[in-house]
């Protein structure tokens, strides 16, 4: 079994007006490329982690076609929340909706952790580096939102640590937002990551910055970008 990761699919099956193709040639035919590359690479017994910005839909009902597409692809899928996942609801509503429309191979990384054999997956959405970051929502309660994400990451990492026990297996963290970027960091998140012994963090959210190094080392942790356009829509091999 292999594990892959790719963020920022930005699927728009029912929201053609939100297609990412308006952002340049890199995005041309991106939905078809995602599906083609995925089917070529991923096997049924593999797992793919998708940390956020999954669908442009505004509700679960509107996201059905995008989620059914993901479900139809090979492998088990684990979804995290991104800042554009407005369709995201409660876990209870997700599970009821999935049962109703016949989704069987999608689960959620949200206040929990997953035993994936060789690694244990933990993570949360994260948030903007600071309240004045480009595209950060205005009038958002930055401190409250950040504190909530810190607590969610701690909950997830604590669950991962319980799974790990004395096995020595690696805990790998998957975030939507990078906790370190452009010389700045969110120390409340990076301190937690270091405290729990995480050595690899995968993140998305960043688009159009194709000269970024694929790995940014910081205090013994490797921060790896997995935005779909950065990866040219090919899921990234994790282990």
Image: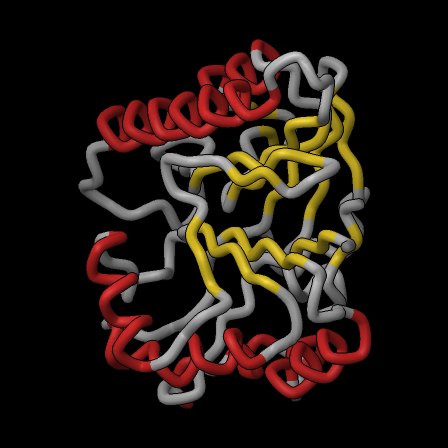
Q: Is residue 208 left or right of residue 106?
A: right
Along the viewing direction, whichever of 149 and 163 lies nearer the viewer: 163
Q: Indicate whether 175 appears above or below 148.
A: below
**Image quarter (top left, top right, bottom left or bottom right) of the C terminus:** top right
Residue 210 image point, x, y percent: 76, 56
Q: Indicate whether 95 appears above or below 158.
A: below
Residue 151 image point, x, y percent: 34, 23
Residue shown at the point (73%, 84%) measured from the top left: 36
Residue shown at the point (51%, 82%) measured from the top left: 69
Q: Is residue 159 left or right of residue 233?
A: left
Residue shown at the point (55%, 81%) measured from the top left: 72
**Image quarter (top left, top right, bottom left or bottom right) of the N terminus:** bottom right
Q: Indicate whether 9 appears above or below 121.
A: below
Q: Is residue 6 left or right of residue 89?
A: right
Residue 25 image point, x, y percent: 70, 81
Which corner quadrant of the image does residue 18 belong to? bottom left
Residue shown at the point (61%, 22%) measured from the top left: 164
Q: Indicate whether 150 appears above or below 125.
A: above
Q: Is residue 168 left or right of residue 90?
A: right
Q: How many marks?
A: 0
Coloring scheme of the render? Answer: secondary structure
């Amino acid at each position: 079994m292999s594990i892959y990761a790719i963020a920022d699919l930005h699927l728009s099956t029912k929201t053609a007006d939100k297609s990412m193709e308006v952002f340049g040639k890199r995005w041309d035919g991106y939905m078809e490329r995602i599906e083609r590359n995925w089917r070529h690479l991923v096997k049924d017994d593999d797992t793919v982690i998708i940390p956020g910005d999954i669908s442009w839909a505004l509700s679960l009902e509107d996201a059905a076609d995008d989620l059914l597409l993901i479900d139809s692809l090979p492998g088990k899928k684990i979804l995290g929340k991104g800042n554009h996942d407005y369709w995201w609801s409660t876990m209870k509503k997700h599970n009821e909706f999935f049962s109703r429309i016949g989704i069987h191979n999608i689960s959620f990384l949200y206040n929990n952790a997953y035993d994936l054999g060789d690694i244990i997956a933990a993570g949360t959405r994260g948030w903007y580096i600071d309240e004045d970051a480009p595209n950060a929502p205005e009038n958002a309660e930055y401190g409250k939102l950040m504190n909530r994400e810190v607590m969610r990451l701690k909950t997830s990492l604590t669950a991962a640590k319980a799974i790990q026990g004395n096995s020595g297996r690696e805990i790998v963290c998957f975030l939507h937002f990078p906790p370190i970027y452009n010389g700045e960091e969110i120390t409340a998140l990076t301190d937690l990551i270091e405290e729990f012994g995480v050595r690899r963090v995968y993140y998305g959210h960043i688009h159009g910055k194709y000269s970024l190094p694929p790995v940014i080392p910081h205090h013994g942790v490797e921060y790896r970008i997995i935005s779909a356009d950065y990866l040219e829509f090919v899921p990234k091999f994790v282990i």
